[in-house]
Image (cartoon, helix red, strand yellow):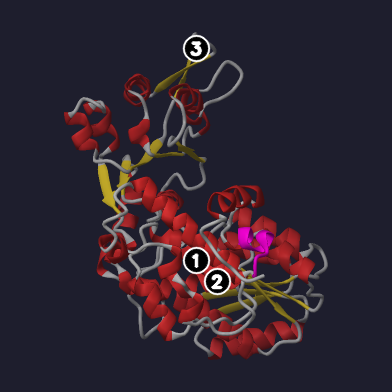
Amino acid sequence: MKILVVDDEKLKRMTLRDDLRESNYDAIAVESPLIGLQLLQQEAFDVLVTDLRMPQMHGIDFLKRVKKEHPHITVIVMTAYASVETAVEALRFGAYNYIKKPFSSDELILMLDKLKALRGKTPVENTQPSLKTSGTNQEPSLYQTLIGKSQKIQEIFKLIPKVAAADSNVMIYGEEGTGKSLLAKTIHLQSPRQHQPYVSLNCYGLTVDAIESELFGGQSRQGKLQLANHGTLFIANVDTISLDGQAKFLAVLEDRKLAVLSEIEHVAVDLRVISTSRENLKEKTKRGEFLEDLYYQLNVIPLFLPPLRERKGDIPMLINHFLDIFSPHQAIRIEPDAIKVLTEYPWPGNVSELENIIERLVAVNNGTDITAEEIPIELKLPTSQKLENTPNLTSFHEIIKSTERELIAWAMRKTQGNKTRAAKLLSMKPSTFRDALAKHIHQIEWEE
């Protein structure tokens, strides 16, 4: 891992450089952001460690420029003026973490070791190949990294550099919450088009007219196809586009031009399309619900992201990853018995659901280790075994209603009847929570 240290204090700067090198990190130290920017243009770095208060350029301005020009680099800020406000500001503009002066080199090295371990890059467990950006040798930031060491996810990792370089259209299949949009963005960031626009459109839930308006634009507004020109267009749930919309989309891909200004003029279109589908498009073409020619245009390179239940060995690594995101300045540990509960749960919402649960646990945590008792999976969400043992719940709506009631009852007990806190616990708007509570008020109990 290659580290760039930027600090105007010479003694601290040189001490950090030497200590990092002794810990087997490839470290370079410079005294100003301007020199740092020059070096970043000339060499590839994995991590930038920078002071916030420096002459010539403030650290926040330096951070924003670095993240704009080198979005994959991980940034750690250090300052003697640390406060909640400056820390939040730095994190908001893309910093991975911050460290308050005075600190020992060991503290920074521990942070870097943890970062390296989360990326799966430790010498003992070097199972995850680095996801290099084409032509830069840079790795994605912690927040944009697909994580896992299972065979199924490793197979995806091995394909990413080849798929990114091919510049062919890609179709990503998988259940909701498996990380399809993250994979699409990763492919773009490693492709020759990485410095060109990345434009996304989720078709799910949109009307026929809304989808076509978003794709093709209107008289005074550019559509996604034009906005993504020379770059990558990511279309989630492409299977929901109408046949008429599919025909127009196919015409653009085949002719490589797009009608604008009430279809009087045309602009040349050069883009890569990465799509996702929750349905088997091949089967939809057989049923006449999806144009076969469009299917072949989009399905040049098909990829499949496995559900989390098929790669349970990745769950502990994902838990640590989300703990690091949601509690970057407080060491919260999940005890083995709690990890066992989380690992055994089937996760119908996949990685997104796991992320939500960890965020919720951190939000209500008081700084102690998280135990199995704090993860009421059986109360919150029905497992496959639970569904199998409840033949009286014969309809989808009954199952949803029962689950909603259990969730609300758990939240009200957890917060001693505080509706505002209970809504926050379930990541719901207070008004939505109150409406849901009203439906089940006579069927649940809690102590205030």
Q: From what the image shows, is residue 47 above or below residue 245? A: below
Q: Is residue 419 magenta?
A: yes
Kindly identify the residue that appears in the image at 31 percent across and 71 percent down.
Answer: 312
Q: From what the image shows, is residue 190 above or below residue 334? A: above
Q: Is disc 2 placed on a helix, strand or loop?
A: helix
What residue type is disc 2 on? Leu
Image quadrant where one finds the C terminus: bottom right
Q: Residues within 10 Å of mark 3 (few under 14, many from 20)?
A: few
Between the C-alphas of marks 1 and 3, the distance is: 50 Å
Where is residue 344 shown, x and y percent of the image? 33, 73
* Residue extent of the magenta highlight: 416-424
User: Circles 1 and 2: CB distance less than 8 Å?
Assistant: yes
Q: Residues within 10 Å of mark 2 (few under 14, many from 20)?
A: some
Q: Is residue 227 magenta?
A: no
Where is residue 310 shown, x and y percent of the image? 27, 65
Q: Earlier in the sequence, mark 1 or mark 3?
A: 3
Position of residue 186 in the picture relative to residue 383 (left or right): right
Instruction: Provide the residue designation for mark 3.
Output: 265
Q: Quadrant of residue 32?
A: bottom right
User: Circles 1 and 3: CB distance less than 8 Å?
Assistant: no
Q: Is disc 3 placed on a helix, strand or loop?
A: strand
Where is residue 378 shown, x and y percent of the image? 40, 69
